Image (cartoon, rainbow, N blue to C red):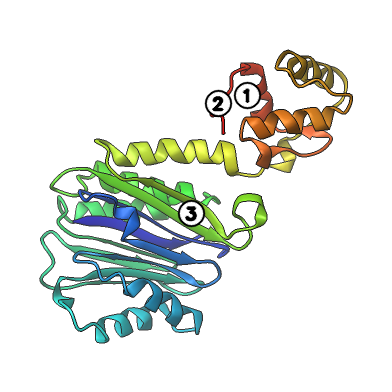
Amino acid sequence: MTFSIVARSADGTALGVAVASKFLGAGAAVPAALADVGAIATQSYANLAYRPQALTLLGTGVAATDTVRALIAGDAGPVAQRQVGVVGTHGPGATFTGDRCHAWAGGAAGDGYAIQGNMLAGPQVVADMATAWLACADQPRLPYRLVDALRAGDLAGGDRRGRQSAALLVVAKGMGYGGTSDVLADLRVDDHPDPVAELARLLELHTLYFERPDPATLIPLIGEVADEVRARLVTAGHAAADLDAALADWAGIENLEERIVPGAIDPLVLAQLRSNGSLSPR
C-alpha cells in the first residue's frame, strides 16, 4: 500500500524517511527516526511497535540488518504481510518484504539506504527510486535527496491504487528549530490528489522558514544595502535606530527569524523584504 525510502546523509549526520501511499496520513504511521541512532519505515499491515523497537536496538549498536531480523523474529502477528526498512548511523540499510504482501512488493538496500514498497505499479518503482537516490550522491541536504527519490518512485507509477498521502521526517542533532530540537524536517500531506508534489512544495517553504542561512551568501548590512533595508523596514512599520533590531523584529513577524544574522542579511530575507508582503502571520 506504500513506497518509502529510509536513508542516511552522505556525511552521516542526518537520518530520515520519505513515504507516499494511497492511505490516509501515512506519515502518522510509517516513519520514525532518532538523531545519532537511526530511522525506520514500517508498512504493509504496519506494526507500529517496530518503530520504538528498532530505534532501541539501533541505539544499542545493533546493525540495521540484525535489527530487521530481530523485529521479524519477535513479531507474533502476520509477518508474511509485513514490510520494513531500517538504516543506522553506519553500514548498509536493510529491508524486509513478507511473501504475502500485495503485489508488486519488494525492496532494495545498500550503503546508508533501504527502499521498499508494496501494491506497486511494478518493480520499476523501487528500481527508479534507487537510481535517483544514487544519482544524487552530491546533494548534501538529505530532505531534498529523499524527496527526489520519492518523486522518482511516484513518476514510475507508485502505489497502483493511486495517490493520497506523503510525508518526510528527517532528524539531525541540534538542527531543529532554534537549535533546541533534533527534528530537522517533519512534513506531512495527509490527503491530497498529488501528495508527492505537494510535499516537495512544502519542503521549499520549510527551507525558507527553517533552514539556517549559508554564511557564504550573507550580504553585509552596510552602505546602499543598509540604506535600502532601513527604508523598506520603515515602510513596513519597523523603524528603529538599531537596524539589526528592526530587521529582527520584522523577520519575527514574517516567520523568518531562523535566517537572521546580526550585521548581515540573507539574500532570501532581502528578497522577501523587497516583496513587501506578509507571508504567513503567526
Left or right: 41 as drawn, with respect to 279: left
State the quadrant of the C terminus.
top right
Q: Is residue 185 above or below residue 268?
A: below
Residue that label 2 marks: 279
Name the residue located 38 percent from the left edge and 78 percent from the top edge. 53
Q: Nearer the viewer, residue 267 or 280?
A: 280
State the quadrant of the N terminus.
bottom left
Name the residue located 56 percent from the left edge and 29 percent from the top edge. 281
Would residue 84 be visible to someone looking at this image? yes
- Mark 2 residue type: Leu
Name the residue located 26 percent from the left edge and 41 percent from the top edge. 155
Q: Are marks 3 and 2 in contact (CB under 8 Å)?
A: no
User: Whole-percent x and y of residue 167?
Assistant: 36, 50
Which secondary structure lies at badge 2?
A: loop
- Mark 3 residue type: Ala
Residue that label 3 marks: 137
The local crowd at label 2, few if under 14, some if 14 to 19, many if 20 or more residues have their Cα within 10 Å, is few
